[in-house]
């Protein structure tokens, strides 16, 4: 067989691979643009007058009315105080959930104790209970403790959750090798020392993921803060945004979108700060056997 007859065939797989990668990246770019477009359009509306949302064809150019729209937000509600309130509550709840759920998940994954499986199944069973069913008993408890209209009513009931325990247990069970724990015990390390020095560095990606998800959930929570908060000084950002919809002259979409865009920025910042830990865990893994 001559060289001219087999050379193109030998190059075919490489060409197909390049074409496949090109299509893959094109699809990723298209998907990214589709995901980003709602945020871009929200910013477009936030930078134009209140009638821009009704423009046909849809307006896609950035205007110069953002600060005027946001000034009306500040006139209607104490936006920055609500933003700080949400930042405080979300941070405290996230730190608590990550710490306690990591401890509980690690214990369920690597320790043997009486009724271990029964307790874990009980934790999983609570995931099937609608959260709305717990509102009334939780409110009664908060009232008995005189915590209504305080940050404690937002933080304490959310300090640990079943999903976080399940998530950390599943990750620690495979990522933290028993040989490392035994080595720590031989070296004289206590339970918490082994957890902090051996387990935590390995399960950091899972902790970062749990932190991001929990921060977003608490930040976006509207119902429970609406139930327990009475004083406007304690309002979270979601309640502050809801106040912008009560306008007798009609909805000012430019004002609403400017507030919504600003309220979304902390979520983007948190994701950018911690996403590298998640990506590192997905790409490199932890301890290899």
Image (tube, grey):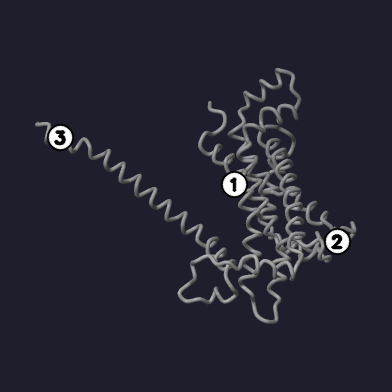
Image coordinates of residue 164 in percent, x first then y, are 67, 46
Number of the label disc, if any, that sits on residue 35: none
Seen from this angle, which residue lies furthest bottom?
Answer: 249
Check whether the beta carbons of the residues at disc 3 and disc 2 lie within 8 A of each other. Answer: no
User: What element does badge 3 sit on?
Assistant: helix
Label 2 Cα neighbours within 10 Å, binned few <14 / some 14-19 / many ≥20: some
- Choose mark 2 or mark 1, whichever is in front: 1
Number of the label disc, if any, that sits on residue 272: 1
Q: Residue at x 69, y 39 (%)?
A: 102
User: What element does badge 1 sit on?
Assistant: helix
Q: Which of the 4 image quadrants contains residue 86?
A: bottom right
What residue would you read off at disc 2?
A: 148
Q: Residue at x 70, y 18 (%)?
A: 186
Q: CA distance from mark 3 to mark 2?
A: 80 Å
Of 252 and 20, the residue lying toward us: 252
- Choose mark 1 or mark 3, whichever is in front: 1
What residue would you read off at disc 3?
A: 6
Q: Residue at x 51, y 37 (%)?
A: 283
Of marks 1 and 3, which one's residue comes earlier in the chain? Answer: 3
């Amino acid at each position: 067989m001559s060289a001219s007859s087999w050379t193109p065939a030998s190059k075919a797989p490489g060409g197909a691979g390049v074409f496949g990668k090109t299509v893959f990246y094109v699809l990723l770019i298209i998907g990214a643009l589709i995901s980003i477009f709602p945020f871009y359009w929200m910013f477009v509306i936030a930078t134009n007058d209140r009638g821009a949302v009704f423009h046909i064809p849809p307006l896609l150019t950035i205007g110069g009315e953002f600060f005027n729209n946001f000034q009306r937000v500040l006139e209607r509600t104490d936006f920055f105080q609500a933003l700080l309130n949400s930042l405080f509550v979300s941070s405290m709840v996230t730190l608590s959930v990550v710490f306690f759920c990591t401890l509980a998940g690690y214990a369920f994954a690597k320790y043997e104790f009486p009724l271990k499986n029964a307790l874990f199944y009980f934790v999983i069973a609570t995931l099937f209970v609608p959260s709305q069913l717990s509102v009334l008993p939780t409110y009664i408890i908060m009232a008995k403790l005189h915590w209504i209209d305080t940050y404690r009513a937002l933080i304490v009931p959310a300090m640990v959750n079943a999903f976080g325990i399940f998530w950390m247990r599943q990750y620690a069970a495979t990522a933290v090798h028993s040989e490392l724990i035994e080595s720590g015990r031989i070296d004289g390390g206590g339970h918490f020392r082994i957890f902090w020095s051996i387990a935590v560095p390995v399960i950091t990606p899972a902790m970062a993921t749990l932190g991001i998800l929990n921060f977003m959930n608490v930040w976006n929570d509207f119902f429970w803060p609406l139930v327990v908060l009475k004083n406007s000084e304690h309002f979270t950002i979601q309640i502050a945004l809801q106040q912008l919809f009560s306008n007798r002259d009609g909805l000012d979409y430019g004002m609403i979108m400017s507030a919504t865009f600003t309220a979304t920025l902390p979520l983007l910042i948190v994701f950018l700060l911690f996403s590298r830990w998640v990506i590192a865990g997905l790409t490199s893994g932890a301890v290899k056997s």
